[in-house]
């Protein structure tokens, strides 16, 4: 399965609680933190909900 690299580029402060929890569930705790995860349907859905706060790259 493909992997994606997710980097938090905007703060979760002053965001709805649901978006804050989604960032935590993705493993993003601080600004400019990066995680590599499998590109499953669940992860893609979570990324879609916080796309305005993160950048996404495919890892080859």
Image (spheres, rainbow, N blue to C red):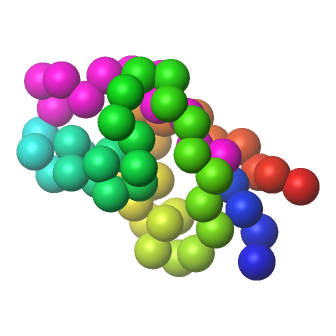
Q: Position of residue 20 (x, y in %)?
A: 21, 42
Q: Is residue 50 left or right of residue 15?
A: right
Our reading of the magenta stretch's main secondary structure is loop
Residue visible at 66% across and 46% down? 5
Q: Is residue 34 above or below residue 41?
A: above
Q: Position of residue 23 (x, y in %)?
A: 33, 46
Instruction: Give the tally of numbered discs.
Output: 0
Please give the range of residues in magenta: 5-15
- Please state which of residues 17 and 37 is positioned toward the viewer in this rendering: 37
Quick check: can you spot residue 25? Answer: yes
Q: Position of residue 59 (x, y in %)?
A: 81, 52
Residue visible at 32% across and 57% down? 25
Quick check: can you spot residue 50? Answer: no
Which of the 4 image quarters holds residue 39?
Answer: bottom right
Q: Is residue 19 left or right of residue 53?
A: left
Residue visible at 58% across and 75% down? 40
The quarter of the picture where the C terminus appears is bottom right
Q: Is residue 40 above or below residue 5?
A: below
The quarter of the picture where the N terminus appears is bottom right
Residue 58 in magenta?
Answer: no
Q: Is residue 28 above or below residue 53?
A: below
């Amino acid at each position: 399965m493909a992997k994606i690299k997710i980097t938090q580029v905007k703060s979760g402060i002053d965001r709805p609680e649901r978006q804050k929890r989604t960032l935590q569930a993705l493993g993003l705790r601080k600004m400019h933190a990066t995680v590599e995860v499998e590109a499953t349907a669940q992860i893609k859905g979570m990324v879609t909900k916080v796309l305005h706060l993160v950048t996404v790259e495919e890892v080859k």
